[in-house]
Image: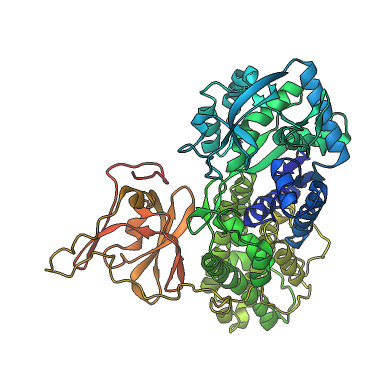
Amino acid sequence: MPDPFYITTPIYYVNARPHLGHAYTTITADVACRFHAMKAAETFFLTGTDEHGDKIERAARKENMSPRAYADKISSIFKSLWPELNIRYNRFIRTTDPDHQALVRQILQKIYDAGDIYFSEYEGKYCFGCERFYTDRELVDGKCPDHETAPEMIRETNYFFKMGRYQDWLIDHIRSNPDFIRPERYRNEVLSFLKEPLDDLCISRPKTRLEWGITLPFDEKYVTYVWFDALLNYVSALGYPDGELFLRFWPHVQHIVAKDILKPHGIYWPIMLKAAGIPVYTHLNVHGYWNIEESKMSKSLGNVVEPLALKGVYGLDAFRYFLMREMVFGLDSSFSETALVQRINADLANDLGNLFSRVIAMTHKYFGGVVPESLKSAEESLSGMKFGDLASAASQTIDQYEAAMENFAFHKGLIFTWEFISQMNKYIDVAAPWELAKKKSCRPELESVIYQLLEGLRIVSGLIYPVMPETARKMQAHLGLPADGPFYRLETLRAWKTLRPGGSLPKSTRLFPRIEPAAAGITAPGNEPAPTAPDGATPDGAAPAPIKPAIDIETFAKIDLRVATILKAEAIPKASKLLKLEVDLGDRRTIVSGIAGSYAPDDLIGKQVIIVANLKPAKLMGVISQGMLLAAVEGKTVTVATLDKAVKPGTMLT
């Protein structure tokens, strides 16, 4: 049996309504939990709300409500949203829950009795938005890096936690466990911060300034600092110290957080656990920001995206797919409805939707909607015709998918799945079932082709299950699989030829209709004509194009130039100048480039090139291009920009 799996989101602060960032984090946890269910692991998924502190008291006052009534209102909005997004948690915890408050007081008393909490006067720069003191080295131009406001200087007596005592232990633990904090960039960020002496943590607020919090067990005049309260939810939810859930799941805990709360989770939390004598968590998984028009999404900037509004327009599974496919876990990603529509139309409507419709329709056309039998002799005959082997392709895809999903590379898991979908579409084109149907002697081969395609759809329905559970269930229902069966289990997916011949299939349905941008109320790039040459190209004999207007270094720094290795190259039908390139720059993506007149596809495989990695996606001749390849153009000759020696794909040019 696989190890149990315990996944947590941060508990969300109830000073504002949920937005796209909250939805992404929670859907990610749901996807990870469903993936481990595919491995037949016992799972526990925790989410909830953080309800104490200055910000809640001020927000409640603004609404003319008590802090408790305000917290009840916003917490219920979060709790009711998650089922709307098909998120299945095991517990929704609130920091106002009695069992949580009792546990916080118990842990505080334990650490206090051990001598790790002391009383002292302190003067420092305090950000009320973050509810914490900042040191000068943490500020950016004298301002809080998150709220972009100058903190206030305050002096007060408080209780402090001796974090500095555990600094060397934490550094050793992080270095001894390379995947303790992942991706690696955030591990390095924490280690960099720990190069400086670690200040002790103020863990109280005087009731003369703040009453809305958990009273300290050893001093009734103070309440607990919000982070010391909130972080303990991860163990209070399981019934620490001797609850059955704690004993079963805590040794396998993984946290998911956004990078803005890396420090509390990467430094405060492991030290708190160590001081309390609780085993430290297994993994801290850190993701980036969703940017809207190149700015971090935030309430204060007024660029918040409402998840339910997107679900209502585009559909829930399409929304979940976009979030998981578009963001490389750990990096920032840009959100736009244009990109969302492009993903839906290209990946879901065209690739997956058309494949599903074609295969089910052919099953009805040639076999009356009955699953045909695939005889071994026919399979051997097809092998001789070099139609490809979907069984081995499926096996390889499942292995790649499992490795990617295990490491939170959800976008790669989907890329591998869509590569298999592409193989299936090519299998149809090469096998040409419509031609086999014309010859009675090829009936066994036709049966085998359709059966293998149906099996391929079964595999796809399982692989998309964590991300698009309702679409997966719709597909398996149309494949005649039982509604309550574990069709998504990896062991089941690996068993080729699971579909039983003779089963009747419902008629095909459209999984994802195409979306017209105008109907969605947005402006999206259409089928733009392919450019004849990059900007600056000149016809034969002409003078070079004039130098463009000067830009400052900040503008240039916005361009993200990366080294990429070309993995595949192919011509685009009806586009004599364009090639479709599959490239590796740390992730795999498609780029359309107008270099077909100067390069044969085979000549490009393995070549390292330079691309603009953060160019907004555009559709060229029906293909979504996710970047631009750099090349010099002289007349009709195009020369791709390369390097004089090989480097790691994804290396940045500076």
Q: Residue furthest top?
A: 115
Looking at the image, residue 187 sits to the left or right of residue 309; the answer is: left
Q: Residue at x 74, y 53 (%)?
A: 489
Q: Please name the colour scheme applied to the rendered image.
A: rainbow
**On the rendered image, what quadrant is the N terminus found in?**
top right
**Compared to 327, does 426 lie above or below?**
below
The spot of residue 507 in percent (x, y) is: 73, 79
The residue lying toward the viewer, choosing from 530 and 82, is 82
User: Going by the image, does 49 lie left or right of 426?
Assistant: right
User: Can residue 363 be seen by looking at this rendering?
Assistant: yes
Residue at screen point 65% across, 79% down: 362
Q: Quadrant of the C terminus?
A: top left
Q: Is residue 536 left or right of residue 93?
A: left
Q: Nearer the viewer, residue 115 or 539?
A: 115
The front one of 372 and 284 is 284
* Residue most extreme to the front: 208
The answer to whether residue 393 shows anywhere in this view is no
Question: Could you tell me residue 301's position as x and y percent?
Answer: 55, 55
Q: Quadrant of residue 183?
A: top right
| Residue 66, image x, y percentages | 81, 49
Report the number of discs: 0
Q: Position of residue 196 (x, y in %)?
A: 52, 23
